[in-house]
Amino acid sequence: MADIASDQYSKFPGAEKAALQELPAIKDRLTFIYLERCKISRQDSAFTATDQQGQVMIPAHSFVTVLCGPGTTVTHRAVELAAEAGTTIVWVGEGNLRFYCQGRPLTDGTTLLVRQAKYVSTPRLHIEVVKRLYSLRYPGENLTGLTLQQLRGKEGSRMRRTYREQADRWDVDWKGRNYDTEHFSQGDPVNRALSVANTSLYALCLSVIYAIGLSPGLGFIHVGHQKSLVYDIADLYKAEITIPLAFRIAAKNPPQLEKEVRTELRKEFYTQHLIERMIRDLKFIFDAQDEEFLQNAPLCLWDSHRPCVEAGIQYFPRETENEETDE
């Protein structure tokens, strides 16, 4: 296919790319929208979702995440709009079990990313972050003096107790967390509901982490996986949000369980102001200030004697004068 001259791109229909400062802050956006069996494209500053029943317009700057379920087709222009709007596109598998991809961070700076790398690679700072993460799960409790092994045991007991309490409350038969991604539909209602709810929570966490310029692969409690930090953050909210909701809906066992879980979970994310909570918790974890979450940072060159030097300049050694020597 022949190349298209760069000036021809301007002829494509669509609104001009918004400046970084003009994009809505991550805390002011809606959590996610789920689409399946449709074609996702772009018209001006909106996504369009088209199927046999018609077309709907979706404002791109209003959502953190677009979940693309089975049967979705996404055009190049839609991905272009997502990148401009800082919206994460996540492809989810059958049953809403898997998620992928990333969007454009809402920051040009790397201050938080550098700090994250420092905290991960420095054992003393790493354990401090781990304790901060656990302290968010036990507000008001004094965790001083507990070892990492004791904290893990305490968390394990809390989660087992949470599952049992919800099972008793909603009179749901609970035999433990057990599911098979290859045969998802054969699972019991509560495990299916938990999987769908947790995957949606992971997708939202992934979007927020990307949006503020952090790396999802540099985790603290969870390590060694490309989404380690996603699991660290998501675990802060499961006992309060996804687990109770999954048991409540599983108790009804509706015919479209997965759809109802996503619908009710989106409402729960909104009423709980979950995005704002995530931002607040991430600020606490990384000891960050508001201005570090939205930076228009210049590109610099590393220098061993000062923080950085300006990029975009051709540097060359100074010419040394030839000194005359007497023979």
Image (cartoon, rainbow, N blue to C red):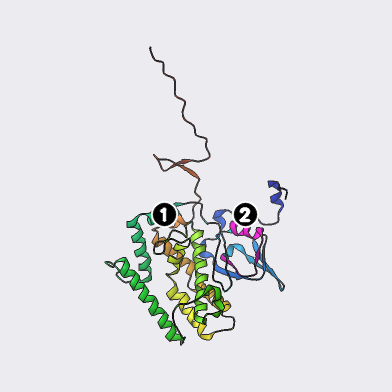
Q: Residues within 10 Å of mark 2 (few under 14, many from 20)?
A: some
Whether residue 150 sits left or right of residue 56 in the image: it is left
Label 1 crowd (10 A; few <14 / some 14-19 / many >=20)? some
- Disc number for residue 161: none
From the viewer's perspective, is residue 301 above or below residue 60?
A: above
Residue with the mark numbered 2: 17
Where is residue 82? Give x, y as percent: 60, 60
Residue indicated by mark 1:
117
Q: Nearer the viewer, mark 1 or mark 2?
A: 1
Q: Which residues are magenta?
A: 65-84
Is 181 magenta? The answer is no
Seen as rendered, the residue at the extreme top is: 327
The residue drawn where x is 38% and y is 79% is 161
Q: Amino acid at mark 1?
A: Ala
Horizontal side of 30 relative to 308 (left or right) equals: right
In this rendering, is residue 299 above or below 37?
Answer: above
Is 82 colored magenta in this rendering? yes
Residue 106, horizontal then vertical, whole percent: 52, 57
